[in-house]
């Protein structure tokens, strides 16, 4: 016997549609989660750089202490590979000395793995001085 094939028949298409739609939804969900992770890492780096700049700006502290504080905070939060390139310097902003903390870190592309030096963060804090009269 010969089987008759009807062109308008939708039987068996539900599993194929499910696979295509669920694959698209999984990719979209993973992309949103990766974006959230990248924003979390960026926010963490900004916070650590700000805290390190404030620490370095204290009257009884120095730039090395601020750099170490920044590295410690980044290492605890997201890992030591993000804390490798941290630097600090004193710059002049509007006639006032300011500590500038600079962090170069990888941009997370797949999980925490990413492009080297894909993210640059800079933070500032006014330098404290003890007035002697």
Image (tube, grey):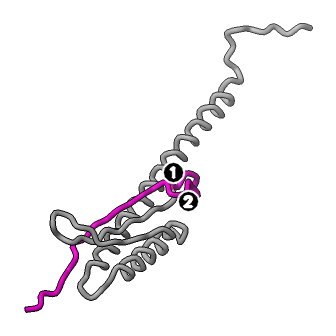
Residue position for label 2? 112
Q: Position of residue 111 (x, y in %)?
A: 57, 56
Which residue is drawn at the image coordinates 45% and 71% (left, top)? 74
Please identify the quarter of the rendering in which residue 101 is found. Answer: bottom left
Mark 2 vs mark 1: in front: 2
Quadrant of the rendering where the C terminus is positioned:
bottom left
Q: Earlier in the sequence, mark 2 or mark 1?
A: 1
Say if mark 2 contacts mark 1, CB within 8 Å. no
Say which residue appears at 12% left-offset and 87% top-offset: 131
**Membership of 123 in magenta stretch:** yes
Q: Position of residue 127 (x, y in %)?
A: 22, 76
Residue 84's spot in the image, x, y percent? Answer: 51, 70
What residue sits 66% from the left and 34% below the top? 19
Q: CA distance from mark 2 to mark 1?
A: 9 Å
Q: Residue furthest left?
A: 133
Give the quadrant of residue 16. Answer: top right
8 sits left or right of 41 in the view: right
Task: Give, as a single range, the part of the protein colored magenta.
Answer: 107-133
Give the main secondary structure of the magenta stretch.
Answer: strand
Residue denoted by label 1: 34
């Amino acid at each position: 016997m010969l089987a008759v094939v009807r062109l308008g028949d939708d039987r068996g298409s539900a599993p194929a549609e499910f696979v295509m739609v669920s694959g698209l939804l999984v990719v979209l969900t993973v992309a949103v989660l990766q974006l959230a992770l990248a924003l979390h890492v960026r926010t963490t780096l900004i916070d650590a750089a700000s805290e390190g700049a404030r620490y370095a700006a204290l009257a009884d502290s120095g730039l090395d202490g601020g750099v170490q504080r920044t590295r410690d905070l980044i290492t605890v939060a997201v890992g030591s590979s993000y804390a490798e390139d941290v630097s600090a310097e004193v710059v002049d902003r509007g006639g006032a000395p300011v500590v500038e903390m600079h962090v170069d870190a990888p941009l997370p592309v797949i999980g925490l793995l990413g492009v080297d030096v894909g993210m640059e963060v800079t933070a500032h804090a006014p330098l404290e001085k003890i007035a002697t009269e």
